[in-house]
Amino acid sequence: MSTCPSDLQRPDATLLARVSQQLRGWAGALGFSQIGVADVDLASAEPGLLAWLQAGFHGQMHYMAAHGLRRARPAELVPGTVRVLSVRADYLPRDTPEDWRDRERTRLSRPDEAVVSVYARGRDYHKVVRHRLQQLSDRIAAEIGPHGHRVFCDSAPVLEVELARRAAIGWRGKHTLLLDRGHGSMFFLGEIYVDLALPVTPVLAGKADEHGPVDVQGSCGSCTACLSACPTQAIVAPYRLDARRCISYLTIEHDGPIPTELRSSMGNRIYGCDDCQLACPWNKYAQVSALPDFDVRAPFVAPTLLALWDWDEATFLHRTEGSAIRRIGHTRWRRNLAIALGNAWRETGDAAIAAALQSAIDAGLDDAVLAEHLAWALAQRA
C-alpha cells in the first residue's frame, strides 16, 4: 500500500461522502461500467473457501491454498485496508453482433476451427484493467490527497466475486461467475484496496429494474442451464466448481498432461471456455466494451486449428504479444492444439490433420507431455 498521510491529514466524512458520489463518473470516464464500495469483513465467506480448498477443487493452483484465508481477509493481504472499490469492465468487442452467442455455438460445432475464449481475443485484460484502476486511484488522490491503496485485477489472492457482490455489482451465478441483470457475465472485475472509510454501497433487497424485482440473493431462480452446458461437468453443483475438470483451468492453469477422459469433451476449445456463459439467459443482455483494447486481434478473428499449429515459437510470441494467451507459453499452446486436432481428426477424417500430427512426431520432440498428446491425437481415428 502506498504511503499514507498522518491521522491529522485524514479526510473527513463529508469529503469521503463527496468522493463517493463522484466515483461513478470517474470510473465511467475510464471505461468501467460500474463501481461499488465493499466492507472488508468477509468472515461469512471463509467456510465456503476452506471447503473448496479442502475438496482439492483448486487443482494445481497451489497459490490458492498457500494464501489460505488471506484471500478472504483484505486487511491481512494489504495492511491498513478498510474498504475495497470493486469495478466491472465489459469485454465484448465493440463490433459484436446481437446474435454473437449463436455465432459462438456455430464455431464450436465446426471441428476444424480453433476456439479461443472471447475475453482473450484482444489485449491482456490484466494490464488494461490495472492501468485504468491506477488512473482512478490517481483521480481519487487528486481530490483527497495521498492515501494508502493497491490495485488488483485477477493478480493476487483476492476474493473478487464476493467483494463485487458485496459492492452491489451483481450476484454470484450458479456457474460461480458474477452476474448482472443488465450486463450478464461478460465482464472483468477489478479492485482497489484503500485505507479510506468510504461509505459502503448498499445491497438492497426488493429493488426493481427494467427486468423486474431483484432478489438480493440473485436472479438465477431454478435455471440450471450453465450446469447442463458444461462440456466436462465441472460445475458439480450450483455455485460449486471443480477447477480440475474446467476447460479454462485445463487449457490455461494446468501444466502437464490433461486427463485422457476429459480430452474428447474439450472439442476445439484451445484457450478457455465460454459454454456456461453462452447458455446463461442473462447474457442476452451482455454489453459491448467501451474500450478498443478488447477488440479481436487479427490472428483470432476466424482461426483454424491447422493455421495455428503452423506457428513456431517465434511466431507465437509475436502474434500473442500483449495478449493474455502468451502467458501459457508455446509448448502448452501446442498441447492444447494437439487435443483439438485429435478431436477434429476423429470427427472429420481430414488427412491434412493426420499429416500435420505425424510430421510433428517425425520431427522429434523434446517435451514428453506434448509427445504423448500428439500420439493420443493421431490415435483418435486408428
Image (spheres, grey):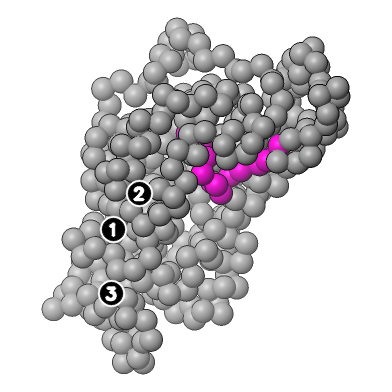
Do tag 1 and tag 3 residues touch (Cβ < 8 Å)? no
Q: State which tag comes first along the sequence, 1 or 3.
A: 1
Which residue, given by chain and number where applicable, does mark 1 sit on?
266
Local secondary structure at mark 1: helix
Q: Nearer the viewer, residue 367 or 129?
A: 367
Q: State which tag comes first along the sequence, 3 or 2.
A: 2
Which mark lies nearer to you, 3 or 2? 2
Residue 159 among magenta residues: yes
Quadrant of image for the C terminus: bottom left
- Residue 156, how many percent across, how many down? 55, 47
Q: Give the left or right position of residue 6, taking residue 303 as reference.
A: right
Residue most extreme to the bottom: 363
Q: Is residue 175 visible?
A: no
In the rendered image of this protein, does residue 330 appear above or below residue 62? below
Label 2 and label 1: CA atoms lie apart by 19 Å
**Residue 216: quarter of image:** top left
**Residue 278: quarter of image:** top left
Label 1 and label 3: CA atoms lie apart by 13 Å
Which mark lies nearer to you, 1 or 3? 3
The mark found on residue 58 in the picture is 2
Which residue, given by chain and number where applicable, does mark 3 sit on?
373
Residue 160 among magenta residues: yes
In the rendered image of this protein, does residue 201 appear above or below residue 76? above
Local secondary structure at mark 3: helix
Residue under the image location 52 percent in, 63 percent down: 327
- Residue 288, how many percent across, how many down? 56, 39
Residue under the image location 46 percent in, 61 percent down: 302
Highlighted magenta segment, given as a residue range:
149-161
- Residue 148, how many percent across, how many down? 74, 35
Local secondary structure at mark 2: loop
Q: Nearer the viewer, residue 309 or 15?
A: 15
